Image (cartoon, helix red, strand yellow):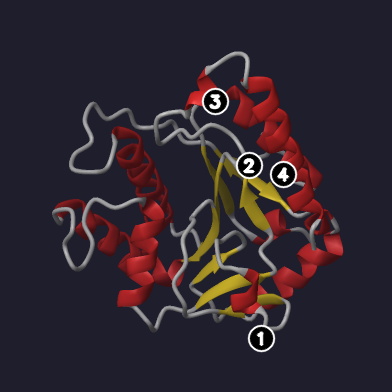
Amino acid sequence: MRLIDYFERLYIIHLPERTDRYQALSRELAAIGVDIKGPKVHLPPPPRPLEANGFPSIGVYSNFIRHLGILKECLQDGVERVWILEDDAIFRRRLRQEVEQDKLIQRLEKNDWDLCYLGHAIEQKALSAYPTGLVPFNGEFIWAHCYCVHARVLPQLVQYFEETLLNPPGHPRGGRLYIDGAFTLFRRLHPDVVCLVSNPNLSSQKGSPSSLAHRNWYDRIAATKPLVTASRLIRDELWRLNS
């Protein structure tokens, strides 16, 4: 059994102009048995706000309301289990084995989780005392590029994210945040929410120019782009191979 069989929907947060990311993610997903054009896969059109609305940038604002829009749609449609990806996700090679995916599903089928992060920024040494697989984790961490949500937590998650849209930046309960910052505060404010993380981390973010911030100088100069691209590809492949 593969992960795509367990989840009712897979949403991908993607900007149509980033054809490089679409093609790369298509290959990543195909390697783990997911057809990006399959019936469970949804690529909702991106909102195009004209201003940042108090967020660090228009891109950060757009990204936040896209995640929120997906969660609201799942709540409205009664989706029980959803998997959400950003288009820069890459996966460990071990995840290409169906037996590895089946182990994850067996853990998820215990039905005692609310949020599950297949990708995260937790340092491996912080997980060294935990068994391998999906483990409960109460610490704080960033990234929200590859995560899963159970219907149980959708009402309070949507309510909280909508609250942060109304709060000013710097509000103690969070206001106008990056999406991973909003998730971090949500978990802190709701310690009863059961959060699972993969140990080791099974998904990272592909080395590529950011869609949320201004591009670095080496991504704008034609002479340096090939070298930068090659170094990113090597970094990504080394990460995939590392168990």
Q: CA distance from mark 2 to mark 1?
A: 28 Å
Q: Position of residue 58 (x, y in %)?
A: 29, 34
Q: Amino acid at mark 3?
A: Tyr
Q: 236 or 181, which is in the foreground?
A: 236
User: What residue is shown with label 2?
Assistant: 206
User: What residue is shown with label 1?
Assistant: 129
At mark 4, the secondary structure is helix
What quarter of the picture does the N terminus occupy?
A: bottom right
Q: Amino acid at mark 4?
A: Asp
At mark 2, the secondary structure is loop
Q: CA distance from mark 3 to mark 4?
A: 18 Å
Q: Position of residue 24 (x, y in %)?
A: 69, 33
Q: Is residue 120 left or right of residue 57?
A: right
User: What residue is shown with label 3?
Assistant: 218
At mark 3, the secondary structure is helix
Please, is residue 224 above or below residue 235 in the view?
above
Q: Residue 140's quadrant in the figure?
A: bottom left
